[in-house]
Image (cartoon, grey):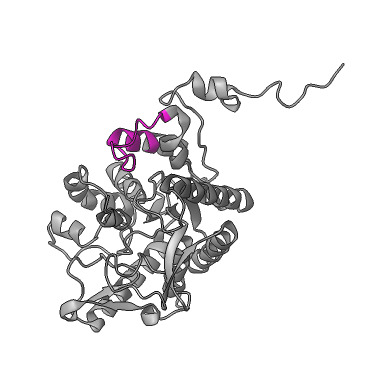
């Protein structure tokens, strides 16, 4: 008797017709089954590109332990706190678009680099901006000392979040970036959100898969150095590039960027037992969605799309191991509830979107 071939007993989700075409976007099932077995009171630290902000909000709204390593000063009104990037990520890193940026910040958090190892940008009227977080202070800093003090606070908050987290969630956003000729990555091209552009000092880089993987491997090693039990959950933002400096059409550049990030994240999750990948990118941008979850600008994700993504996220989590943090996580969630309610309908903060201001068409 002939032996069955491997396709004979595959489940419905293994075939495009039954798993996708007939299921429809709201009928998709078993997209993600986390490989982590987490405590019932697991704590999450969230960082990355714009879309990561939705994960932060959803965790807080569900009462799941979201870590705020750098909270706003007591009594700060919610609107003012958000304007100054408090409560957006687990520390005031602002958006981290590339793996190179993440690696630099983690080197600082681990104590391998001093907080002043990255540039400040001088502004008119004596103001300064942080090249790692150019929009973190809407009007810029009044002095270099103030800027470095703020960065030090952020680095300490980042380290605090890492040491207290069970899961470090990082959303990969871009492969394109800018750096100094010495190799320091920037959060944005100098001159667009602060500082001034100098072709002799600043260069464009479109990170390739090998470089991104090296940065992520190093980042994971640093995370484990600070917290040996931490897990890394990677996602890829479904938000397209606002603009590209690659010379390609922005559609081609976006597809290239997301394909590289998706491949690297997937391979790392396959290679590392303590690393997982969550398919937020596929849910929003995949064929079954038919672009229904994008605003008319075909970039911003509508609330219904975010809700669908987070439904799959929470459906695939396994918070089944015994609790080990007491009730601290629940207390933190309760403290965040009022802030979360006031922020729920607000747009995400996205520095990269500011590039649209330079579209002369």
Task: Note whether 70 is above or below 42 in the view shown.
Answer: below
Image: magenta residue range: 289-309
Q: Main secondary structure of the magenta part?
A: loop
Q: Quadrant of the N terminus?
A: top right
Tell me residue 167's x, y (percent). Answer: 45, 53
Q: Residue at x 83, y 22 (%)?
A: 3
Tell me residue 176's x, y (percent). Answer: 45, 59
Tell me residue 270's x, y (percent). Answer: 62, 48
Q: Is residue 350 visible?
A: no
Residue 290 sits inside the magenta stretch: yes
Instruction: State how many labels appear.
Output: 0
Please tell me in which quadrant of the rendered image residue 87 appears.
bottom left
Q: Is residue 307 visible?
A: yes
Q: Nearer the viewer, residue 174 or 318?
A: 174
Please tell me in which quadrant of the rendered image residue 73 appears.
bottom left
Task: Note whether 270 is above or below 89 in the view shown.
Answer: above
Residue 294 sits inside the magenta stretch: yes
Residue extending farthest top = 1
Q: Residue at x 29, y 47 (%)?
A: 57
Task: Note whether 297 is above or below 247 in the view shown.
Answer: above
Tell me residue 237's x, y (percent). Answer: 41, 47
């Amino acid at each position: 008797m002939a032996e069955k071939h491997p396709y004979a007993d595959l489940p419905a989700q293994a075939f495009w017709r039954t798993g996708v075409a007939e299921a429809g976007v709201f009928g998709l099932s078993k997209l993600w089954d986390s490989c982590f077995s987490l405590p019932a009171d697991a704590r999450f630290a969230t960082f990355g590109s714009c879309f990561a902000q939705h994960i932060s909000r959803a965790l807080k709204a569900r009462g799941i332990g979201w870590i705020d390593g750098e909270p706003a000063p007591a009594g700060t009104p919610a609107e003012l706190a958000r304007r100054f990037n408090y409560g957006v990520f687990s520390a005031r890193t602002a958006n981290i678009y590339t793996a190179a940026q993440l690696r630099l910040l983690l080197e600082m958090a681990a104590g391998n680099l001093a907080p002043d190892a990255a540039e400040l940008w001088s502004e008119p009227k004596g103001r300064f901006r942080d090249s790692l977080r150019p929009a973190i202070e809407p009007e810029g800093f009044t002095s270099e000392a103030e800027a470095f003090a703020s960065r030090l606070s952020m680095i300490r908050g980042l380290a605090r979040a890492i040491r207290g987290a069970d899961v470090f969630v990082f959303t990969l956003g871009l492969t394109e970036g800018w750096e100094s000729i010495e190799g320091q990555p920037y959060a944005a091209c100098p001159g667009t959100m602060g500082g001034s552009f100098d072709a002799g000092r600043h260069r464009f880089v479109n990170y390739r898969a090998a470089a991104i993987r090296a940065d992520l491997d190093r980042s994971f090693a640093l995370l484990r150095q600070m917290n040996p039990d931490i897990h890394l959950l990677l996602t890829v933002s479904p938000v397209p590039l606002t603009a590209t400096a690659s010379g390609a059409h922005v559609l081609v550049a976006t597809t290239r960027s997301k394909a590289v990030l998706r491949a690297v994240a997937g391979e790392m999750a396959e290679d590392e037992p303590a690393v997982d990948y969550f398919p937020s990118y596929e849910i929003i941008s995949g064929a079954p969605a038919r672009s229904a979850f994008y605003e008319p600008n075909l970039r911003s994700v509508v609330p219904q799309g975010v809700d669908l993504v987070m439904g799959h996220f929470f459906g695939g989590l396994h918070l089944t191991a015994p609790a080990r943090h007491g009730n601290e996580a629940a207390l933190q969630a309760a403290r965040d509830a009022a802030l979360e309610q006031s922020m729920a309908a607000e747009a995400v903060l996205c520095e990269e979107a500011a590039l649209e201001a330079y579209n002369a068409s």
